[in-house]
Amino acid sequence: MLKRRNRVEATFAMSSMTDLIFLLLLFFVMASTMSSPNDMKINLPQSRAKTTTKQVVAKVSIDNLGNYYVALGKQQPVAIESEDLEMYLTSVQQQDSTMYIALHADEDIAYKEVVNVLDIANEHKMKIVIATKR
């Protein structure tokens, strides 16, 4: 009878350890699924948002070849070199300090092209909106 009782007590002692290991395993599985790997391919330029900006002063477009185009308001886009973009945007900002930049970037361009425009806007404290299709 004593041997059987020790065996039952050992089983109960191990069950709490098994619960703890199961909870730790569950925690690590959940934590590992929350982190996203860097090599995941995503297709970002789509949105279902209904809000739009009321005032868009400067439009910056980047086509799939990496060419930059700028336009004020509803004017036709004009080609510009990437090196001249910062000077152009700062001159527009001097005319109107409440300006917005609408960035229209092709989904197939290198991400560094978008980051280049974001850096210019951040450096000069400009408001920027990234345009997406619905």
Image (tube, rainbow, N blue to C red):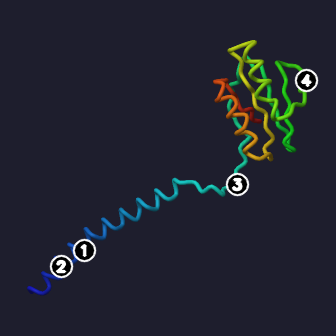
Q: Residues within 10 Å of mark 3 (few under 14, many from 20)?
A: few
Q: Is residue 33 above or below residue 75?
A: below
Q: Say which amino acid is labelled 1.
A: Met
Q: Name the residue tied to disc 4.
A: 76
Disc 1/disc 2 C-alpha distance (Å):
10 Å
Q: Nearer the viewer, mark 4 or mark 2?
A: 4
Marks 4 and 3: in contact by CB < 8 Å? Answer: no
* Residue ID at (74%, 32%): 131
Q: Which residue is mark 2?
A: 8
Disc nearest the viewer among 1 and 2:
1
Amino acid type, mark 4: Gln
The residue labelled by disc 3 is 41
* Marks 1 and 3, how far apart at CA: 44 Å
Residue under numbered circle 1:
14
| Residue 101 falls in image quadrant | top right
Q: Nearer the viewer, residue 37 or 50?
A: 37
Query: Which type of secondary structure does the marked residue at label 1 adopt?
Result: helix
Earlier in the chain: of badge 2 and badge 3, it is 2
What kind of residue is marked 2? Val
CB atoms of marks 4 and 1 within 8 Å = no
Of the image marks 4 and 2, the number of the one nearer the N terminus: 2
Residue 84, can we see it?
yes
- For image coordinates 63% across by 55% down, the residue present is 38
Q: Quadrant of residue 123?
A: top right
Q: Disc 3 on helix, strand or loop?
A: loop
Badge 4: residue crowd in 10 Å (few <14, some 14–19, many ≥20): few
Q: Which mark sits nearer the N-terminus, 1 or 2? A: 2
Residue at mark 2 to residue at mark 3: CA–CA distance: 53 Å
Cα–Cα gap, marks 3 and 4:
33 Å
Q: Report how far apart the C-alphas of labels 4 and 2 lie in the structure.
A: 83 Å
Q: Which one is earlier in the sequence, the residue at label 1 or at label 3?
A: 1
